[in-house]
Image (tube, rainbow, N blue to C red):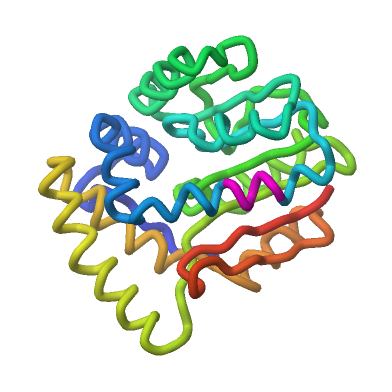
Amino acid sequence: MTKVVTPYKNSDSSKKEQVAEMFNNIAPKYDFLNQLLSLGIHKGWRRKAIKLISVNNPKTILDIATGTADFAIEAIKINPTKVVGVDISSGMLALGEEKIKKLNLKDKIELKLADSENLPFENNAFDAITVGFGVRNFENLEKGISDIYRVLNNGGMLAILEFSKPKKFPIKQFYNFYFRFITPTIGKIFSKDASAYTYLPESVNAFPDGENFLNVLKKSGFKQTKAYPLTFGIASIYIAHK
């Protein structure tokens, strides 16, 4: 059972409600801080994930926890007929809509306010599904993965990009120091929400990465599961097939 970590320790709200509130709070500075804290590396990670699912030539793609729609926009490069992005944060989606409009992609990308653990789609609705840094925010990880399996087409591919915990010296020590001290400090200065960037390392630490997460995928029915460590193991792409 995954330990439940929430953004706001003194809140009586559910994790799902707190995560939505957190992302609404940090939405205006989210893209800026993403770029600053990752030094832009996250863009290459997304490109690799999209390249991995491109072998199936998916025509319909669902991007879960789409946030400001970066993954959905990246997916357009493999020429699907439709990309749908869902998120529980209206603030993040509003910024995503602005990006899509500027890029003239409104006919290709549709964003919806929706719960990732109760997806508002029919069974077998999508050829591919992506999730970028979102599954560790699920209130019930296994329920969320099971619903992803439900809406994925038979033969479809899932690509999940998520933070991992490096194992080797000195990357492990530097990573832990950066996440515990640097990230919350920078996040507090720019986002004005100290809890959000304290929650980030806590949620990563609680997430069952590597082989443990592959087991969660298998338990929900996924097969041909594989983890691709990225940048000394600070993140991973998980690929699975239905």
- Residue 218 magenta-drawn? no
Q: Is residue 234 left or right of residue 45?
A: left
232 left or right of 146 in image = left
Q: Nearer the viewer, residue 123 or 101?
A: 101
Figure check: 53 above or below 1: above
In the picture as drawn, the residue positioned furthest to the right comes out as: 155
Magenta-drawn stretch, dominant element (helix, strand or loop): helix
The vertical placement of 9 against 3, above or below, is: above
Q: Nearer the viewer, residue 110 or 56?
A: 56
Residue 46 position within the rendered picture, expressed as x and y whole percent measured from the top left = 55, 47
Horizontal arrangement in the rendering, residue 61 relative to residue 203 (left or right): right
The x, y position of residue 43, in whole percent, is 48, 47
| Residue 241 screen position, x and y as percent | 81, 51
Q: Image height check: is 37 above or below 234? A: above
Instruction: Look at the image and say whether residue 50 sits in the magenta stretch.
Output: yes
Q: Residue placed at 44% from the left, 17% from the top?
A: 97
Name the side, left or right, on which 167 lies relative to 37. Answer: right
Picture residue at 71% right of the left edge, 34% below the top = 78
- At a point 37% along the width and 23% down the height, the residue shown is 95
The residue segment tinted magenta is 47-51
Residue lying at 14% horizontally and 58% vertically, measured from the top left: 185
Rendering coords of residue 30 (x, y %): 30, 38
Tell me the quadrant of the picture where the N terminus can be found. Answer: bottom right
Q: Could you say which is closer to the camera, residue 190 or residue 102?
A: 102
In terms of image quadrants, where is residue 154?
A: top right
Residue 219 is drawn in which quadrant?
A: bottom right
